[in-house]
Amino acid sequence: MTPNPSRPTDDPTAWVVLLRGVNVGGSRRVSSADLREAAATAGLTDPRTYANSGNLVAVGPADDADVAERVTAALAAQLGGDLRAVALTAERVAAFLAADPFPDAVADHPAQVQVHVSPAPVDADALARLAEGRPERFAVVDGVLYVDYVAGIGRSKLTPAAIDKAAGTWTTARNWNTLTKLVGMAREAT
């Protein structure tokens, strides 16, 4: 029997799903309960959320390339509107942390170090140009943008729109503490 490519068959793994731009300022509201329900509707098991800001850990097949699409489709069916999400294996998120280009900043002010992830690799050259003359430190490792907001995220004049334009794709960012927590939750899930 030939496997159905739309039905993943690989061993289960923990997935980290990050919604873009929800529950911040006046942006789109997605409750943790709605996000967990969407994950279950999308076929994921053991859905858990963190910090009510679009962070989900759930279990699904390791070879499933459609996790983000199914979760956002389930949310759209529940809540309407257009949401964006990126889904990464917990192993990949752990690799982001292991690749730490700013160990001094992570030790000193981890909440001010953000990792910007997207559905496609970011444009490292354009981001390097964006970083010129700014107080923030930028690094691109394996297609992912790391930003050390040296003076604090709230004081930065760097906008998500400027990052996305330079990156050549939309991104969603989480600080170091959040990613560390999500990886810990993922380890508990599997």
Image: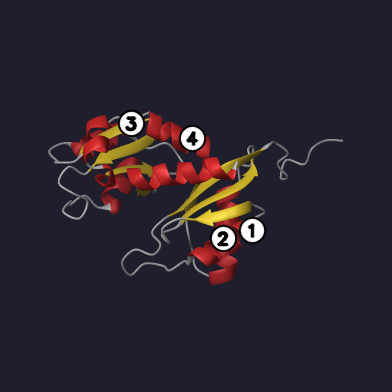
- Could you tell me which residue is drawn at 37 percent across and 28 percent down? 99
User: Can the viewer see residue 89?
Assistant: no
Q: Is residue 28 above or below residue 85?
A: below
Q: Give the residue type that dot 4 points to.
A: Arg
How many neighbours does mark 3 have within 10 angstroms: few (below 14), some (14-19), or many (20 or more)?
some
**Disc 1 element:** helix
Residue in the foreground of this view, choosing between 41 and 170: 41
Q: Give the residue type that dot 3 points to.
A: Asp
Percent from the top left, x then y, of residue 42?
64, 56
Q: Which residue is mark 4?
A: 92
Percent from the top left, x then y, of residue 1?
87, 35
Q: Which residue is mark 3?
A: 100
Mark seen at residue 36? 2
First in sequence: mark 2 vs mark 4: 2
Mark seen at residue 40? 1
Q: Pointers 4 and 1 in contact (CB under 8 A)?
A: no
Q: Distance between the Cα atoms at labels 2 and 4?
A: 21 Å
- Could you tell me which residue is drawn at 34 percent across and 45 percent down? 177
Which of the image's four quarters has the C terminus? Answer: top right
Q: Is residue 56 above or below residue 7?
A: below
Q: Distance between the Cα atoms at labels 2 and 1?
A: 6 Å
Q: Pointers 2 and 4 in contact (CB under 8 A)?
A: no
- Could you tell me which residue is drawn at 42 percent across and 55 percent down? 20
Q: Distance between the Cα atoms at labels 4 and 1?
A: 22 Å
Q: Distance between the Cα atoms at labels 4 and 3?
A: 13 Å
**Disc 3 element:** loop
Q: Distance between the Cα atoms at labels 1 and 3?
A: 32 Å
